[in-house]
């Protein structure tokens, strides 16, 4: 499945692209459940700390919040929604997505996504491999 086919599938089910959370990994469609309150609390705390770093670095990198699409492949078979992508190349930040690998992507593990998120996924863009940090919301 391509990104375009994923978007058509969501529209066929009656959702706009913004209403339904989904990821596409190597052409496989994954429906994403809404995050729990605990998940959102953890994201909020991490976002605040990372935002303080962003300000201290005078905006050299941007900390973004999900839901935001991150398109990695030129061939359009992977579209992710990491919880907290950090991008240091402003040209990668587009109106509705990040086009290219973020410099850091933080993913909060939840019971609903734990098994999928722990599956090793080789994600690279040319010579650049993105760094995924996983934090379990079940530990808090």
Image: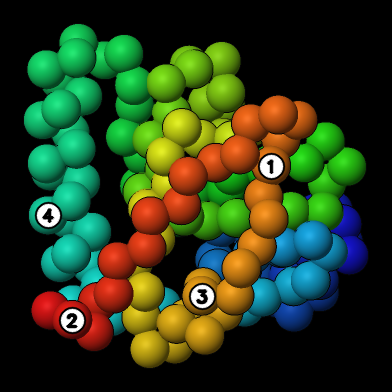
Badge 1 is on which residue? 124
Determine the CA span between mark 3 and mark 1.
17 Å
Quick one: 76 or 136, which is closer to the camera? 136
Q: Which label's residue is closer to the chain start, 2 or 3?
A: 3
Q: Pinpoint residue 110: horizontal percent, then vertical percent.
A: 36, 80
Q: Is residue 33 visible?
A: no
The reply to whether the C-beta atoms of the residues labelled 3 and 4 are less than 8 Å apart is no
Dot 2 surroundings within 10 Å: few (below 14), some, or many (20 or more)?
A: few
Badge 4 is on which residue? 45
Dot 1 surroundings within 10 Å: few (below 14), some, or many (20 or more)?
A: some
Quick one: 117 or 6, which is closer to the camera? 117
Q: Pinpoint residue 12: horizontal percent, then vertical percent.
A: 81, 74
Residue 118 - label: 3
Q: Residue at x 42, y 21 (%)?
A: 88
**Image quarter of residue 31:** bottom right
Q: In the rendered view, does 24 fall on the left or right side of 131?
A: right
**Image quarter of residue 74:** top right
Q: Residue at x 57, y 23 (%)?
A: 92
When the figure is inspected, residue 52 is found, relative to residue 44, above or below; the finding is: above
Q: Is residue 5 visible?
A: yes
Badge 2 is on which residue? 139
Q: Residue at x 37, y 74 (%)?
A: 109
SS label for mark 2: helix
Quick one: 32 or 57, which is closer to the camera? 57
Determine the CA span between mark 4 and mark 2.
15 Å
Q: Foreground mark, 1 or 4?
A: 1
Q: Pinpoint residue 15: horizontal percent, then vertical percent.
A: 65, 71
Determine the CA span between mark 1 and mark 2.
29 Å
Q: Residue at x 24, y 77 (%)?
A: 137
């Amino acid at each position: 499945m391509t990104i375009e086919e994923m978007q058509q599938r969501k529209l066929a089910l009656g959702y706009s692209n913004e209403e339904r959370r989904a990821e596409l990994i190597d052409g496989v469609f994954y429906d994403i459940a809404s995050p729990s309150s605990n998940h959102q609390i953890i994201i909020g705390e991490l976002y605040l700390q990372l935002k303080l770093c962003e300000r201290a670095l005078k905006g050299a990198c941007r900390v973004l919040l999900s839901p935001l699409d991150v398109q990695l492949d030129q061939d359009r078979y992977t579209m992710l929604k990491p919880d907290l992508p950090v991008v240091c190349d402003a040209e990668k930040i587009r109106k509705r997505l990040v086009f290219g690998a973020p410099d850091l992507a933080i993913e909060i593990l939840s019971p609903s996504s734990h098994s999928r998120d722990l599956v090793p996924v080789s994600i690279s863009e040319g010579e650049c491999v993105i760094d995924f940090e996983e934090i379990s919301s079940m530990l808090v």
